[in-house]
Image (cartoon, rainbow, N blue to C red):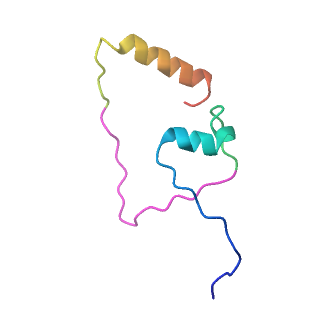
Amino acid sequence: MLNKKMTKPLKRISNSAELKAAYPDQFEKIGNLSGTVNLFLKEDAEPFIDPLRKCSIHIKDKLQAELNKMVEQDVI
């Protein structure tokens, strides 16, 4: 049986600027989500570890600065 309640049509969002404009309070800062999450995996999924990736010496300082910033924000 269909729900006959009238709903507002969804506006198509085609880029990140429109997404930020539609939900401004969601993009003010990096935060933690509350609640629990369920991950559904294939029954035959095999865990693996990707090998370390080397970074170019030209961007090493910039990369380290970004990693430090992410640690300060409790992202990683």
| Residue 51: image location, x then y, percent | 30, 34
Front residue of this view, candidates 26 and 63:
26
| Residue at image point 29% right, 23% down | 54
Front residue of this view, candidates 58 and 51:
58
Q: Inspect the magenta stretch and tell me whether residue 27 lies in it.
A: no
| Direction bottom: furthest residue | 1
Residue 57's place in the image compared with 34, above or below, is above
Front residue of this view, candidates 76 and 19:
19
| Residue at image point 30% right, 11% down | 58
| Residue 15: image location, x then y, percent | 47, 43
Is residue 63 left or right of 2 when viewed as pictured? left
Is residue 49 left or right of 37 when viewed as pictured? left
| Residue at image point 29% right, 12% down | 57
Q: For the C terminus, which image quadrant?
A: top right
Predominant SS of the magenta segment: loop
Residue 22 sits in quarter: top right
Is residue 30 left or right of 68 when viewed as pictured? right
Residue 76's place in the image compared with 6, above or below, is above
Residue 21 sits in quarter: top right
| Residue 35: image location, x then y, percent | 69, 52
Q: For the N terminus, which image quadrant?
A: bottom right
| Residue at image point 62% right, 25% down | 73
Q: Inspect the magenta stretch and tell me whether residue 41 lies in it.
A: yes
Residue 18's place in the image compared with 64, above or below, is below
* Stretch of the chain drawn in magenta: 35-51
